Amino acid sequence: MTFLFKHFNSGTSYSGPAAIRLLRASCGQPSHTRLYQPADNECYLFDNLAKLGFTQHLMMDHNGEFGGFLKEVRENGGMQSELMNQSGLPTALLSFDGSPVYDDLAVLNRWLTGEEREANSRSATFFNLLPLHDGNHFPGVSKTADYIKSARRNCSMNWTPSSPNWRNPGVR
């Protein structure tokens, strides 16, 4: 069974605190200050899922370096899984810092291919996306990408495995 969470409350609009809140969901939503203090072990969602037999995966359509996002997710969110290999993924956008933002469907297809090879059918994946982040731009264009165009290009796909386009990143 596959679950794709599309509506959840992270209690913040910034990606770092939102990720920490989600990864510490087992203990509710602490104050912003408490997000950056050690939490009890039972607060870490992915550790709890591992105890229930779920394998853990970490996917991002970016490198996680800006603002120490990946470090923050590891240190404050308890996410210790290795970041999924991003080599060879097509670049859809460039982030405001010039780093690549990979094509989300290609990232999802790589994850799905790995899931199909995995012996354990129970897995939990943390996936962080940047295609609609302020300041992103298309390669070769310095102007910030139009939000509506980016949303249509990057977010209008049906990402369910039953979709005929699920495994075909060339189809939009």
Image: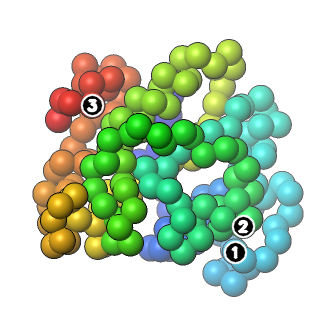
- Is residue 48 shown left or right of residue 159? right
In whole angstroms, how far apart are the C-alphas of marks 1 and 2? 7 Å
Q: Which of marks 1 and 3 is nearer the N terminus?
A: 1
Give the vertical position of 172 relative to 7 (above or below): above
Give the vertical position of 17 relative to 109 (above or below): below
Query: Which amino acid type is shown beneath numbered disc 3?
Result: Pro
Q: Which residue is drawn at 50% across and 31% down?
A: 111
Q: Which residue is drawn at 82% across and 71% down?
A: 38
Q: Return the residue nearer the eye: 80 or 22.
A: 80
Q: Which residue is drawn at 17% across and 35% down?
A: 172
Residue 139: x percent and y percent? 22, 58
Query: Which amino acid type is shown beneath numbered disc 1?
Result: Leu
The kind of secondary structure element at disc 1 is: helix
Query: Which amino acid type is shown beneath numbered disc 2?
Result: Asn
Residue 55, by quadrant, is: top right
Tell me the residue that label 2 is attached to: 76
Disc marking residue 169: 3
| 1 vs 2, front mark | 2
Q: Do the residues labelled 1 and 2 touch (CB within 8 Å)?
A: yes
Tell me the residue that label 1 is attached to: 35
The kind of secondary structure element at disc 3 is: loop
Residue 126: x percent and y percent? 57, 47
**Number of disc labels:** 3
Q: Which residue is drawn at 74% across and 65% down?
A: 75
| 1 vs 3, front mark | 3
